[in-house]
Amino acid sequence: MSSKELRRKTVLDEVAGGRRKLRSAAEALQISYRQCRRVYRRYRQQGEQGLIHRNRGRESNRKIGVEQRHQILARYQQRYTGYGPTFASEKLADEGLGLDHETLRRWLLEEGLWQRQRRRGPHRQRRERRKRFGELVQMDGSHHAWWGEQPRCLMNMVDDATGRRFGLLFEQETTEAAMRTLWGWIQRYGVPQALYVDFKTVFRTDRQPTPEEQLNGEKPLTAFGQSCRKLGIELIFAGSPQAKGRVERSHGTDQDRLIKEFELEAIQDLGAANRFLQQRYWKQINQKFAVDPADPQDQHRPAPAATILAELFCWEQTRIVQRDGTLSYENRCFQVLADNPIRPTLRAQVVVRRRLDGRLEILYRDHKLRFREIAKPSRSASVRKTRLPARGVKPRPEHPWRRFRLRGTPAFSNRTQRGPAP
């Protein structure tokens, strides 16, 4: 019996037992009262067999005959082999052999003439953990409302071999956020061999290489990429979120646990949140979820001094020193002082470095220059040259142009009339 027929049997048993009226049964089964009386009468006379649909097991009057089925399948094999059932049914209908595409699909499957072609996603192979701590570290940002309604970004780092984690909270996922998070990891564990990141503009740029980069055979890098290159860290870009699934799955853990930790500690600002992360939260998470690596050898390189890291995590741009010893940077003007031991030549290229704390440095051949900021010069109105409109001046009769003539041609005259000269 089908589920519909079992439902009818349950309701009609209540009617037979006197626990329900026939009109109530009709409402429960969503049929008319007269239909309910007929069904109940058949049930009393034939039992469960009376509730089963009478057409069950009988062939349909619209069933296609065996001879016509053989004709359609033969025509399919003759001309439409490899066609899908829907398209083949349309072509067969044009020849007067019309039938439903689902019927044709069922026949082809039964005869083995067609096979379902399922759309499969790209093949993904499970990647084993790296064997050593620091060999590969995954990095990603988790955007969530950690408290209140404003979403913030947790820059998260997870070691691939051990699952050891570290991260900091910021307002947005920016270059500075990525630099400060990597700086914190290096101070704790050292310099990792490689970073696994996504295709966000913080990590990868689509700009064209500069002429200097083309001559040196270098690829264009973001400010974060340049810092990683100086530290000897390889940037590996993930083709999908599943590729760096370890850090992606850790976001769910943080969005469950960390929110409740902030509520218990009554944390409502970034400073207190980052202190809690570094002093307590990551220790608890690493003790609970981190595992031992397959190879106990640590692949981290020793961490540089803090002064060196401050010079490495920065933004650098090339500028041209003008003839008066000035240069422009971010709509500001700077004067290179004359008491520098090494002074740039005229029109020389210098590197302007902006650190994470906002301090600026100007470097010429890897030497830091002394400079000061000056007011940006403004062009006065008196200096501007105004170009007067050109006036049409008619040459005088004695002008050399009028005296000029070719041999055998008459001299030019002031006459405006046309025609030969008298």
Image: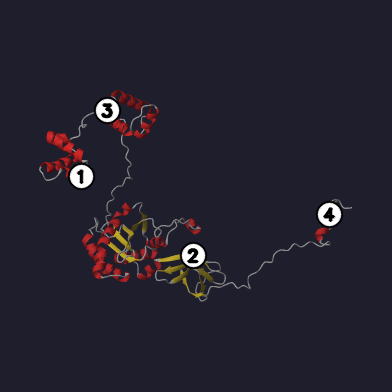
Which of the two marks, 3 or 2, is nearer to us in this view? Answer: 3
Which of the two marks, 3 or 4, is nearer to us in this view? Answer: 3
Q: Earlier in the sequence, mark 1 or mark 4?
A: 1
Q: Residue at the far bottom: name it.
A: 339
Q: Give the residue displayed 63% in from the left and 70% down from the top.
A: 384
Cα–Cα gap, marks 4 and 2: 66 Å
**Marking on residue 27:** 1
Cα–Cα gap, marks 3 and 4: 106 Å
Q: Residues within 10 Å of mark 4 (few under 14, many from 20)?
A: few
- The residue identified by callout 2 is 318
Q: Earlier in the sequence, mark 4 or mark 2?
A: 2
Q: Is residue 227 visible?
A: yes
- The residue identified by callout 3 is 61
Closer to us: 275 or 352: 275
Q: Residues within 10 Å of mark 2 (few under 14, many from 20)?
A: few
Mark 1 vs 3: CB contact within 8 A: no
Q: Earlier in the sequence, mark 3 or mark 2?
A: 3
The image quarter containing residue 312 is bottom left
Q: Give the residue displayed 15% in from the left and 38% down from the top.
A: 40
Cα–Cα gap, marks 3 and 2: 85 Å
Cα–Cα gap, marks 1 and 2: 83 Å
Q: Earlier in the sequence, mark 3 or mark 4?
A: 3
Q: Position of residue 7 (x, y in %)?
A: 17, 42
Q: Give the residue displayed 36% in from the left and 59% down from the top.
A: 233
Closer to us: 82 or 350: 82
- The residue identified by callout 4 is 417
Q: For the residue labelled by badge 2, is the local secondary structure a helix, a strand or a loop? A: strand
Cα–Cα gap, marks 1 and 4: 112 Å
The kind of residue tagged 3 is Asn
Q: Earlier in the sequence, mark 1 or mark 3?
A: 1
Q: Earlier in the sequence, mark 1 or mark 2?
A: 1
